[in-house]
Image (tube, grey):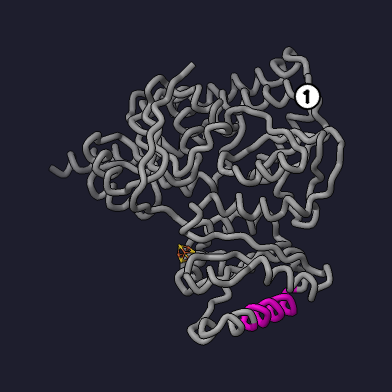
Amino acid sequence: MGGAMLLKETGPREVFCGLTSIVWLHRRMPDAFFLVVGSRTCAHLIQSAAGVMIFAEPRFGTAILEERDLAGLADAHEELDRVVKDLLARRPEIRTLFLVGSCPSEVIKIDLARVAERLNSALGGRVRVLNYSGSGIETTFTQGEDGALKALVPLMAQSQDDQLLLVGTLANAVEDRLINLFKRIGINNVSSFPPRESTNLPTVGNGTKVLLTQPYLTDTARALINRGAEIIKAPFPLGVEGSRLWMEAAAKAFKIEENLIHSILEPLIIRAQKALQPYKEQLSGKRLFLLPESQLELPLARFLQRECGMKLVEVGTPYLNRELMQPELELLPQDTPVMEGQHIEKQLDRVREKQPDLVVCGMGLANPLEAEGISTKWSIELVFSPIHGIDQAADLAELFARPLHRRNLLNDKTLTNV
Ligand code: SF4
C-alpha cells in the first residue's frame, strides 16, 4: 500500500471561483439557466471564462447589482425579481433557474434561498428556481458543480430500484460509451447526474449505487447518501488503470462475474496501452508539480506516475476528502508529498527551488512560470476535455506531453539562433 505524505498549508490563494463551473454545466443542461447574482467582476469572469459562447446563445447571465440596489436590501430583492421576470418572459424554454451567489459583501447579505422560495411560489412550478454559492470565498472552480448538483438532489424522486448512478459532468460522447460498456457487462439500469435535461432527474434511494466520475463532489455525495444511496469506493476513471478499477468496482458492487468484465475490458486495455506508448516515452522520467486548483490533481498524478512514468515532486489539492480519495492515495508512491490547501508564495518558492519539468496550475500562474522557463499545463483545460475512460487515456497523456514538446521546440529554436 502506498503511503502519501499528507501535508497542509493555508495562506493566500490563487484559484478560480465556483462561478467557472457554469461554463460546463450550462452546456450539459441546455434547458437550465444560471443567473449569477454578483458584481461586474463576476460578469467579466464568466464572460471571459466562457469565451466566445457569450455571443452565441448564452444560457447564463449576471444580475449585476448596482450601487442603487445595494442602498437597501428591499431594492436588491426588487431588482432580482425584475431581472428574473424579464429573463423568463424572454426565454420561455428555461425549465430550471439557478440563482448563483457570489462574494461581494452586498450579495452575501441577500438570502438567495428565500428569494428562490419566493420565486418558486410566484412561478407555480412553471420554472424551478434553485440557489447555490459560487463565491470565491467559499469555493474553488470545480466546487461550483458540487453546489449546483447538491441543490438538485432534493428534487430527485425516491425509488428503491437497483440502479447505477454516474455522478459528475461527463462529455456526452464519453458518457454514451461508458453506459454502453456497463450494459455490456450486465449493468442495465444506469443513469447520469446531472442529466442532459434539467427536469429529467434520475431517481435515488436504497437501491442506488453511486459511482463518482469527478473527485470534487463531496457535498453532492453526502446529500445522495442521506437519500439512501451507497457510494462505490474506487479510483477515478482517468487513465487505463483508474478506469479499469472504477468499472471493476461497479461490477463487484453488482455481483458481476470477474471473468466477464475482464473479457470485455481486455481488448480496450490493449488498444489503449498501445496508443499511450508514444506519450509514455515523452513523459517518462519528467518531474511533475501539481498546484492545487481542480481537485483532479490526485487522480491525474496517479495516472501520470503509474502509467506514464512521471516523477511526482508535489501534488497539491485545494481540498482533500480522505474517504473519497483513499483509493487514489493508496496508489501513489510512498512518501509522495500531497499538499492540501494553498499558500501561493510558498508554493511558488518550492516550484522555483525544485525546477520541475512540468507544472499543472491555474491560468493566472501559467504565464509567469512559462516566462521563467518552466512548462505549464492549465488545470482548467482538464475539465473541458473528454478525459474519462480507458479509450481516452492516450488523449489525456497527450495533454501533458504537448507543453513539453512545445518547450523542446522553443529550446531547439533558441539553440539554432545562438
Ligand atoms: S464570485 Fe467573487 S471571486 Fe468569483 S468573480 Fe465574483 S467577485 Fe470574483
Q: Position of residue 300 (x, y in %)?
A: 48, 34
Q: Is residue 213 above or below residue 139?
A: above
Q: Is residue 227 above or below residue 322?
A: below
Report helix, strand or loop for mark 1.
loop
* Quarter location, residue 80: bottom right
Q: Is residue 174 above or below residue 82?
A: above
Specify whether 216 is left or right of 316.
right
Span shown in magenta: 78-91
* Quarter location, residue 251: top right
Task: Name the residue rendered at 43%, 21% in the picture.
Answer: 3
Q: Position of residue 302 (x, y in %)?
A: 47, 28
Task: Name the residue rendered at 27%, 42% in the picture.
Answer: 374
Along the line of sight, which residue is nearer the eye, 261 or 409? Answer: 261
Q: Which residue is mark 1?
A: 254
Magenta stretch, main secondary structure, is helix
Q: Which residue is most to the left?
A: 418
Magenta-span inclusion, residue 81: yes
On the question of residue 33 being in view, the answer is no
Disc 1: CA contacts within 10 A as few (<14), some (14-19) or many (>=20): some
Along the line of sight, which residue is nearer the eye, 114 or 300? Answer: 114
Task: Name the residue rendered at 55%, 84% in the picture.
Answer: 72
On the question of residue 387 being in view, the answer is yes
Query: How many labels sit on residues?
Result: 1
Q: Is residue 255 above or below residue 324?
A: above
Residue type at the position of mark 1: Phe
Q: Position of residue 138 (x, y in %)?
A: 50, 56
Ligand 1 closer than 8 Å to label 1 CB:
no
Along the line of sight, which residue is nearer the eye, 112 or 312? Answer: 112
Magenta-span inclusion, residue 132: no
Q: Position of residue 385 (x, y in %)?
A: 54, 45
Q: Quadrant of the C terminus?
A: top left
Task: Name the residue rendered at 64%, 59% in the picture.
Answer: 26
